[in-house]
Image (cartoon, rainbow, N blue to C red):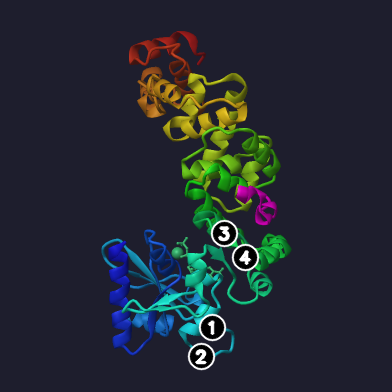
Amino acid sequence: SGSVKSDALKIMDTLHRYGYDAYIVGGAVRDRLLNQPVHDVDVASSASPEQIMGIFPASVDAGMQNGTVLIPSGKGTVTEVSTFKSLPGSRKNCILEDLALRDFTVNAMAETKEGTILDPFNGRADLDNRILRAVGDPEQRLKEDPLRVLRAIRFAVKYSFTIHADLEQAIRKYAFQLAVTAFERKGAELEKMLGSALCERDLIYFLNSPPAAHLEPLFTDRQVWLKKLQQSPAPFLTEGKAMFWFIAAGINDPEVSSRRLSKAKRSSRLKKQVSVMQEVLSSIISDGWTNVNLYKAGEELAMPCERIRALWRGEEPQTEAVLLRYHELPIKSKKDLAVNGRLLIDTFAISDGKWIGKTLKQIEKAVVRSELPNEESTLLDYIRKEVPK
Ligand code: ATP
Ligand code: MG
């Protein structure tokens, strides 16, 4: 984190030499004052994106319409440099106007190169008192951009901020407008919140909050989860992503979740994971683990599945036993199988892709269930005798 800051300071220095104004802004200022690790440093400057790109040849356009460019350090870190935010038609081009257009007072501070804090909205005091307050009129700010409704919950959860009463009232009033916010933006906020491990209490807080009620289609089973969570004092899911799987999975309603995730523009990897989890959960919740389900879940999903199973059944998760059983599986993936398509083609002189695929699936399942040993000659023998050609 020291290096991301020194990158930013160098960039500010260069901008100053070219005659532009530049400050560290947003989360980096807030997190430093909170003595929390700073992951990325945002810089706001009076230079336009074109001017910034002219000064830093390595810079990359990050949606110049938003006035942001990315400047890589060459060491793998990247600094985001934005032009001062300004109202349409405004010609001020100054840090004070930029800060006035930010969402919450704790996010509306700027830091000079020398370390002086600019704090026109008393964000520092709110930070000390752990209060989340809108910059300006909360209703108007939420109307302008309903995503702020969700951001408010994210910050309240992450930093244990109390949402100021006026802001809270505005959140209740405008949460419904989240329906018109782009899924990509909501998804990014959700991933920031759910992707960092939330404790059970915070998840309950989030699920109870007005924004969660308006995050269709992802949270249609909110009430079911809330009830389960409130009934069960079980140690909670600690893997960040598991939280997202857990909510997105909505095991009461498996067939719609893929559609929901598509609508929410989630990655195909996450969709695949959720569909695997649904398949595994739908069977282990009623019947317990089998080798086949462990194999399907794989190392990454076995633990989250076990935790959700236990939560759903009101039991203690058997993480160690499940992990041990996983490691004892005869094979962990198709690649471990002692036969492959090539070998079947060569041995049986059959190149029918459908037959090859079906046969391999059958063999894979039998090996996973320990019905057949994972040995080439035994498997080929079995196919010779038992699989119709
Ligand atoms: P984190 O550390 O979690 O990234 P952050 O405060 O840096 O928190 P970002 O989403 O990276 O959050 O945004 C950077 C800054 O940009 C914020 O601190 C805030 O000042 C401003 N900002 C971001 N999104 C909005 C928004 N929707 N409305 C107003 N200001 C915003
Ligand atoms: Mg940030």
Asked which secondary structure carries label 1, the reply is loop
Instruction: Give the residue at x 49% y 28%.
Output: 296
- What is the distance, in whole Å, between disc 3 and disc 4 at their CAs? 27 Å
Numbered badge on residue 184: 3
Dot placed on the residue nearer the N-terminal end, 3 or 2:
2
* Alpha carbon distance from label 2 to label 1: 8 Å
Q: Which mark is residue 86?
A: 1
Majority SS type along the magenta span: helix
Please tell me which of labels 3 and 1 falls first in the chain. 1
If you read the primary sequence from the N terminus, does the residue marked by circle 4 or circle 2 appear first?
2
Mark 3 crowdedness (10 Å alpha carbons): few <14, some 14-19, many ≥20: few
Stretch in magenta: 205-217
Does the magenta run of residues contain 308? no
**318 horizontally vs 253: left or right:** left
Q: Nearer the viewer, residue 375 or 134?
A: 134
Mark 3 or 4, nearer chain start: 4
Front label number (3 vs 1): 1
Question: CB atoms at circles 2 and 1 under 8 Å apart?
Answer: yes
- Dot 2: what SS? loop
* Quarter where residue 86 is shown: bottom right
Mark 2, residue position = 92
Identify the mark nearer the N-term, 1 or 4: 1
As measured in the structure, the alpha-carbon distance from the residue carrying label 1 to the one carrying label 4 is 26 Å
